[in-house]
Image: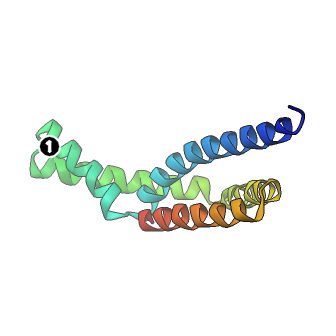
Amino acid sequence: PPMQRPKEIAFALLAAAFIAGGALGYAGGRYVAAREGAPGERGATRRYLAERLDLTGGQAAAVDTILDARRREMTRIIAPVQPQLDSSRQEARRKIMALLTPEQQRRFQELLAEHDKQEGNRK
């Protein structure tokens, strides 16, 4: 039916935005966790390496030093483009909101708040 077409397009755009956002969110979340030194993510990686590789205390300390240097380097690399990434995310959210009904907008805001809270927990 002709009325279904705009809804299908809107749903496809929304699904694509969530998939892209999820992929970027996952990659960004892992980066931010490493950059900010979140105990859950960073500590888990370090523990995983220490356990799987059976690292000695000295090796584990050396790995920590290497990962800390990597975190500092990644922070330096991404700092110039972080405002663009944030702006892109906000613009995509604004465009999605424009497609939605008031009820969908309310639910989308809830999803975003939940997502942002999870991302905040990784920082």
Q: Which residue is mark 1?
A: 51
Q: Position of residue 115 (x, y in %)?
A: 53, 61
Q: Quadrant of the N terminus?
A: top right
What crowding class fits label 1: few (fewer than 14 Cα within 10 Å), some (14-19), or many (20 or more)? few
Q: From the viewer's perspective, is 114 left or right of 112?
A: left
Q: Nearer the viewer, residue 3 or 56?
A: 3
Q: Nearer the viewer, residue 31 or 58?
A: 31
Q: Position of residue 53 (x, y in %)?
A: 16, 37
Q: Nearer the viewer, residue 78 or 87?
A: 87
Q: From the viewer's perspective, is 65 left or right of 7?
A: left
Q: Position of residue 21 (x, y in %)?
A: 62, 48
Which residue is located at x 63 percent, y 42 percent?
20
Amino acid found under the numbered disc labelled 1: Glu
Which residue is located at x 43 percent, y 58 percent?
33
Which residue is located at x 78 percent, y 43 percent?
10
Q: Quadrant of the C terminus?
A: bottom left
In which quadrant of the rendered view does residue 36 lie?
bottom left
Q: Nearer the viewer, residue 110 or 56?
A: 110
Which residue is located at x 77 percent, y 56 percent?
100
Residue at the farthest front position: 1
Q: How many marks?
A: 1
Residue at the farthest top position: 1
Q: From the viewer's perspective, is 57 left or right of 10?
A: left
In which quadrant of the rendered view does residue 91 lie?
bottom right
